[in-house]
Image (tube, rainbow, N blue to C red):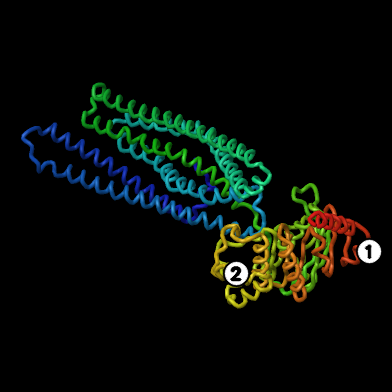
Amino acid sequence: MIDKDLLKLLGKNKRYIFYTVALMVVGLLANVTITASICWAIFMVVNYGNPFTPISFIYPIITIIAGIVVRYISTRLVGELKDTIGRRAKKDLREQVYNKIVRLGVRSTDEMSMAGLTQISMEGIEQLDLYYSSYIPQFFYSMIAPVILFCITVGIEYRVALVLLLCVPLIPISIIAVSKYAKKIFAKYWGKYTSMGDSFLDSVQGLKELKIFKADQNQHQKMNESSEDFRKITMKVLVMQLASTTIMDLVAYGGAGVGIALAVTGIFAWGLNPILALFLILVAVDFFLPLRAFGSAFHVAMNGVSAGKKILSLLEKPDPIWGEEKVTDTELSLNNIDFSYDGKRNVLKNITMSFPKTGMTAIVGESGCGKSTIVNLLYGGIRAKNGQVLVGGKELEGLNRESYYSHLAVVSYNTYIFNESIRSNFQLAKSDVTDEEIYSALEKVNLSDFVLQNGGLNKVITEDASNISGGQKQRLALAISLVSSKDVYIFDEATSNIDIESEAIIMRNIKELSRNKSVIVISHRLANVIPSDKIYYMEAGELKETGTHQELIKLEGGYARLFMAQKRLENGYCEEVQ
């Protein structure tokens, strides 16, 4: 009934569960005291008759008032402690999830999409809040309360007390009977929920393409189907909750009814004092209410557990291997690298490359040849199956990650520009950057006039850089990288899907940068890599040719054929435009 792995996530906050349960027990005892005091007062009325002497009722009244005060205080404190558990649990879990994502760094969170990760990190943790603050304290309290009540009532009439105690386990038995089915339902619920979120996010992000290809109606139909699947699983959850609640109500009130009937019978059959029988009747329901409340919290718990399992799967992912050595030399190289994504088919086969501390090195080839995989290896996003990634002769795994990244910058076709001012985006790369340095970098990429005419450095870039063009976004990303003054720059399709003018500006800056820095360029367009000091040409995960542009053209191999094919296509396009 309690998931130990999820309970461990609470850490030191587990002590608040103990405090909460203790106060709930105090409240129970206060409630029993109030009930006993009422019975005491009735007993005095029945036995002493008229005229009433108010002074004789002073003790039951004081006891009732004291019980009410204790009950009120304990109830308030239980509510505050539950709130504390929830707030601390959410805070700690969000920190753990965030820190885990930070430790994973640029590495992919396998099987966890961005939409799924967001849903789990936000709503999933909210569901775990209820699991920790409501379900777990109620679980322990519902186990303790019937035993305490049995100990109190067994001395009055052991048969009634025993029957009430024996009826109590029927509630958890019914919960256990439902739980296996409930777990499957809630697992499907979260699966459908994250699937619908993924579909929605894809549709929003690709809305332009859907409109261009007139596929929006088809995607709309898919979204409707996904929503309908989620509606059906939600209704199954509600039906299951309603059915199990009905079963628990029948058990709870049926058990209390049996106890009450037995107490009334005891007056005639066993000579039980009517006042004591009244006390047993009044506390009979208290045997079942804790477990009844636990049953209600059970459905919340199942939802929380399903979300918690996904959070645990994220937290249990192995961290990338990094060491503590500082980077002293930034010359990169790959030695006999083999890599496979699925453990079966190698996408890189015996790759050996070197990247000098200055100069421009290009990696080219047709789509799917392994270019981006090499980039991922170089910045530590993935690790090789066989072979070595060396930085200044030291293995990448032995380096301190912060030290390595302080020397490395990666600019890709989808480099993220934050929803902040232009100045704030530059400050991410260099915290003490001056306005003069920013404008100098913007001047290099031909953006300074645009920025000056559109609000200056305080201009806010909207989400996904939607208020600037694709070319401006890429040039801004390049300018931000320039102020960071790294030793190694990796440009992964940095000129993809942008205008010719922006492409020319970026490539001019890349070549200029390569005079003093190590620049690695990944490009599908071979015209961009002509000025490279060295070009690696790949096919199907293998390194086929190495040399300068002129040397590779003379070889008349795969690079030359691809270059000439692209040139013919570009010339043909230009003739059509003219």
Residue furthest to the left: 51
Disc 2: which residue: 451
Image quadrant of residue 360? bottom right
Secondary structure beneath label 1: helix
Mark 2: give few (<14), some (14-19) or many (20+) Cα within 10 Å: some
Tell us which disc is closer to us: 2 or 1.
Answer: 2
Q: Amino acid at mark 1?
A: Lys
Mark 1: give few (<14), some (14-19) or many (20+) Cα within 10 Å: few
Image quadrant of residue 439? bottom right
Let me know if residue 350 appears in the view: no
Point out residue 386 in the picture as x, y percentages from the top left corner. 79, 57
Cα–Cα span, label 2 and label 1: 45 Å
Marks 2 and 1, the one that precedes in the sequence: 2
Residues 516 and 36: in front is: 516
At a point 84% along the width and 64% down the height, the residue shown is 535
At a point 23% along the width and 32% down the height, the residue shown is 276
Point out residue 84 in the picture as x, y percentages from the top left corner. 41, 54
Q: Are marks 2 and 1 in contact (CB under 8 Å)?
A: no
Image height check: is 453 above or below 29? below
Left or right of 246? Residue 513 is: right
Point out residue 337 in the picture as x, y percentages from the top left corner. 81, 58
Image height check: is 98 above or below 2? below
The tag on residue 554 is 1
Total marks shown come to 2
Secondary structure beneath label 2: helix
The tag on residue 375 is none
Q: Amino acid at mark 2?
A: Val
